[in-house]
Amino acid sequence: MTGPEGSEGPDAALPDPDRPAVPDTGGPAIPEGPVADADGPTMPGAAAADPDSPAILELRNVSAAYGPFRALFGVTISVGPGEAVALLGANGAGKTTVARVATGLVAPTSGSVVVEGEDFTGAGAFKFARAGVAHAPEGRSVFATLTVEENLSLSFRQSRGRDGVGSGLEQAFGMFPVLGERRRQLAGTLSGGEQRMLSMARVLVESPAVLVADELSLGLAPKIVDAVYESLTKLRENGSALLIVEQHVGHALDLCHRVLLLHHGAVTWEGPSHDAADRVLAELFEPAAP
Ligand code: ATP
């Protein structure tokens, strides 16, 4: 699935099994499979994720539902300080729901969400944000009738105070030069890809304790996806933890220490990213029917 700016990126996109939400009939058939141990960082320049330090963000045996439709079934995910974790899965697997639960937008029906050791289950998104859990949602979230600069200034004024606006703008325009070129343009008249950059620049500049990023590459041209992943790498190197929800596998595997595969609302495999490529192929790219 690609958005209006969509072009086939260099990465493989996971297939769409065209699967509806799972009715609450006791749970879907979940493929058997070992959940491997993580081995820590796997790529040069990765922040050292200490396996002994307490997790900064945890989902413990979380189930979640939309009305009668159960979307998650006992999902456990742990992200350590400075660790980058990728959550991969096909369309409808429940990735966005995990991102929503992890940032307080959806409350679990059972299980718990823990931020730096404190139980946040049922807390509002505002409390998660205050604790340093940032959410870069799928899609765009900009004020259409404000300029690029006004959008960013508003956000930075809230998070850093009036004195921090200038440096925030400088960082944002350094990250995405096209936003600097278009700083006086109304956000509503930007292209879809530019709007995505604008909504992401606000979050990326903040250096949150943990960033939950949902399908950041969706609908972006390959060049922009590269720029986005460069900023995520910088964020990771500066110590932010990342939970990256993606359909585009290649960038996520390069960026992240550890990978979880989500299938029909359940984690079916977990392991270091260097072991993930084969698993992705085996579990997510099913052979085409004859
Ligand atoms: P995609 O890659 O297509 O964005 P995803 O892996 O992020 O998919 P989710 O968006 O988490 O999957 O959706 C999981 C299931 O929950 C899907 O079957 C979807 O139809 C259903 N679902 C998601 N949001 C809602 C909602 N607001 N109301 C009802 N069902 C929903």
Image (spheres, helix red, strand yellow):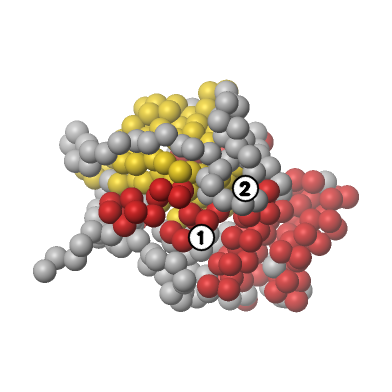
199, above or below 86, in the image: below
Residue at horizontal 46%, vertical 37%?
A: 38
Horizontal relation, residue 162 to residue 225: left or right: right
Front-most of residues 92 and 266? 266
Q: Amino acid at mark 2?
A: Ala
141, above or below 66, in the image: below
Give x and y (percent) for residue 130.
66, 36
Give x and y (percent) for residue 209.
65, 39
Which residue, given by chain and number where applicable, does mark 1 sit on? 251
Secondary structure beneath dot 2 equals: loop
1 and 2 marks in contact (CB < 8 Å): no
Tell me which numbered mark, 1 or 2, is placed earlier along the sequence.
Answer: 2
For the residues carrying marks 1 and 2, which lies nearer the camera in this image? 2
Residue at horizontal 70%, vertical 74%?
A: 178
Horizontal relation, residue 62 to residue 231: left or right: left
Residue at horizontal 88%, vertical 50%?
A: 163
Indicate the quadrant containing the C terminus: top left, top right, bottom left or bottom right. bottom left
Classed neighbour count for the residue bearing mark 2: other residues with Cα under 10 Å, few (<14), some (14–19), many (≥20): many
Front-most of residues 181 and 144? 181
> Which numbered dot is residue 46?
2
Q: Amino acid at mark 1?
A: His
Q: Residue furthest right?
A: 163
Give x and y (percent) for residue 53.
60, 27
